[in-house]
């Protein structure tokens, strides 16, 4: 039985790819855990998103782990993550795209319509699994150019390589979000608010205006 609620409503799926490498120790991992908590609380407080937003959390350090398999926002339990290891970001991107395709197939299997899925990537550094770069890049560009996903990469702290992140955006010309290590929790509030806006939108609309970014988050073009 597929873990899907509200079969008659249009759904939105979101994969969170979160960096838990060693450089995220201290304030950053605490901020990340708090962000994942408030993200869930915000979605669960919205009566529409509660059953129509579906969430998956994938962490990446030296290994990639699906710490929260796809579930309705109503059933989301925030993970408590610890920091350590390298930055297997390319593997995480590939895993996230695989999870999106699986969720889309589940929607199709039960006849549920859906908005274009979202992938939110958060990292404070640069990938260390460069052997998977070409595969991750190709998969991501195919998904972006085919309008299969919306992709939101975010660099946190001064060590984040935003130019490297930019290469993953559509044709290398998209936006990269940026925030400090001590103050990126609001990104999760923005994400949940924007997902709520989408879930409440007219299903016939092809484009929805998202919530404005908080002042603590900047955009690098």
Image (cartoon, grey):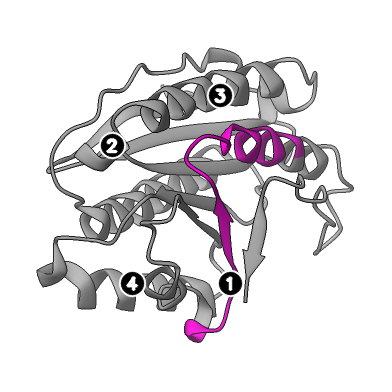
* Residue drawn at 71 percent across, 40 percent down: 190
Q: Where's residue 78, x and y in %? A: 46, 17
Q: Secondary structure at mark 4?
A: helix
Q: Where's residue 101, x and y in %? A: 40, 53
Labels 4 and 2: the sequence-earlier one: 2
> Label 2 crowding class (10 Å Cα cut-off): few <14, some 14-19, many 20+?
many
Quadrant of the image containing the C terminus: bottom right
Q: Secondary structure at mark 1?
A: loop
Q: Nearer the viewer, mark 4 or mark 2?
A: 2
Image disc number at residue 139: 4
For the residues marked 2 and 3, what is the alpha-carbon distance in whole angstroms? Answer: 24 Å
Labels 2 and 1: the sequence-earlier one: 2
Q: Nearer the viewer, mark 2 or mark 3?
A: 2
- Return the residue at label 1: 147
* Residue drawn at 31 percent across, 56 percent down: 125
Point out the stretch of residues depicted in magenta: 171-193
Q: Secondary structure at mark 2?
A: loop
> Label 3 crowding class (10 Å Cα cut-off): few <14, some 14-19, many 20+?
many
Taking the image as shown, residue 137 lies to the left or right of residue 188, namely left
* Residue drawn at 58 percent across, 59 percent down: 177
> Label 4 crowding class (10 Å Cα cut-off): few <14, some 14-19, many 20+?
some
- Return the residue at label 2: 20
Q: Nearer the viewer, mark 2 or mark 1?
A: 2
For the residues marked 2 and 1, what is the alpha-carbon distance in whole angstroms? Answer: 29 Å
Taking the image as shown, residue 213 lies to the left or right of residue 63, namely right
Quadrant of the image containing the N terminus: top left
* Residue drawn at 80 percent across, 64 percent down: 206
- Decide if residue 194 is in sight here: yes
- Return the residue at label 3: 72
């Amino acid at each position: 039985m597929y873990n899907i609620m509200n079969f008659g409503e249009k759904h939105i799926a979101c994969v969170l790819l979160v960096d838990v490498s060693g450089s995220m120790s201290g304030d950053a991992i605490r901020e990340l855990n708090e962000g994942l908590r408030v993200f869930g609380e915000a979605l669960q407080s919205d009566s529409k998103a509660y059953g129509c937003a579906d969430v998956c959390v994938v962490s990446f350090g030296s290994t990639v782990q699906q710490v929260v398999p796809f579930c309705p926002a109503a059933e989301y339990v925030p993970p408590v993550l610890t920091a350590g290891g390298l930055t297997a970001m390319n593997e995480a991107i590939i895993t996230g795209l695989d999870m999106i395709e699986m969720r889309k197939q589940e929607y199709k299997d039960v006849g549920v319509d859906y908005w274009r899925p979202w992938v939110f990537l958060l990292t404070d550094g640069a990938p260390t699994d460069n052997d998977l770069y070409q595969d991750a890049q190709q998969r991501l560009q195919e998904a972006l150019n085919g309008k299969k996903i919306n992709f939101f990469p975010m660099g946190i702290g001064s060590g984040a390589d935003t130019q490297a992140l930019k290469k993953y955006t559509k044709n290398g010309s998209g936006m990269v979000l940026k925030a400090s290590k001590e103050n990126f929790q609001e990104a999760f509030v923005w994400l949940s608010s924007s997902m709520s806006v989408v879930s409440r939108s007219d299903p016939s609309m092809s484009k929805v205006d998202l919530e404005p970014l908080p002042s603590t988050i900047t955009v690098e073009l």
